[in-house]
Amino acid sequence: MEIIDIVRKLTGPIEPVGETHTDDKRFENLKVRLELMLELHKEIDEIAMYYAHRQEFSMARAGKECDKYLKQLGIPEDA
């Protein structure tokens, strides 16, 4: 089982289906998933910001990888 499968199982389905009762629950699941994503993105952003230009290879490598990820999302470096 992959991590994404575990997250999906823990947070539940998020796709609306057009039935109010079901979609209300899925909307709550969506808000939980978005809150998780925000926290994860904050961590990635901090690593990119503080470590991408470090002298130590392993720290710079992590920072640059995070910076690359953020650029793939279209998030500017100083956002």
Image (tube, rainbow, N blue to C red):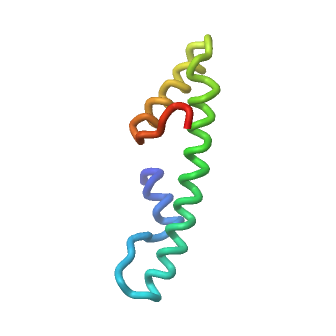
Looking at the picture, tell me which residue is in the foreground, 58 or 27. 27
Q: Position of residue 55 (x, y in %)?
A: 61, 11
Vertical order, 30 against 79 (above or below): below
Residue at image coords 57%, 56%: 36
Outermost residue on the left side: it is 17
Vertical order, 39 against 54 (above or below): below
- Classify residue 53 as left or right of residue 7: right
Quadrant of the snapshot with the C terminus: top right
Residue at image coords 35%, 83%: 18
Residue at image coords 54%, 74%: 28
Outermost residue on the top side: it is 55
Looking at the picture, tell me which residue is in the foreground, 47 or 57. 47
- Classify residue 14 as left or right of residue 51: left
Q: Position of residue 1 (x, y in %)?
A: 42, 54
- Classify residue 3 as left or right of residue 56: left
Vertical order, 49 against 74 (above or below): above
